[in-house]
Image: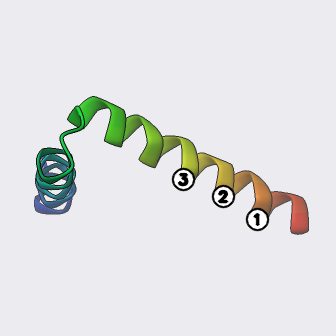
Amino acid sequence: MSSKAMSLNGNIKNYAKSNNIAARVVLQNYMFRLFSLEDVVECRR
């Protein structure tokens, strides 16, 4: 795993822990928003 991926994973775990949320849920929301934004950018091209 690259250092960038490990950093993202650590950030997600820290955020989840500080907000009492499962890290899996935070990651799912992050991925959903990431792909949603890509769709918006593609539509504007």
The residue singled out by tag 2 in the image is 37
Q: What is the spatial separation of the Cα atoms under label 1 and label 3, in whole angstroms?
A: 11 Å
The residue singled out by tag 3 in the image is 34
Determine whether label 1 and label 3 are within 8 Å by CB.
Answer: no
Identified by mark 1, the residue type is Val
Q: What is the spatial separation of the Cα atoms under label 1 and label 2, in whole angstroms?
A: 6 Å
Q: Can residue 12 be seen by looking at this rendering?
A: yes
- Locate residue 29, reporting x and y percent: 46, 42
Q: Say if 1 sits above or below 24 in the image.
A: below
> In the image, is 41 to the left or to the right of 35?
right
Identified by mark 2, the residue type is Leu
**Sequence-earlier tag: 1 or 3:** 3
Q: Residue at x 34, y 33 (%)?
A: 25
Determine whether label 2 and label 3 are within 8 Å by CB.
Answer: yes
- Locate residue 44, reporting x and y percent: 89, 68
Numbered circle sitting on residue 41? 1
Q: Residue at x 43, y 48 (%)?
A: 30
SS for callout 3: helix
SS for callout 1: helix
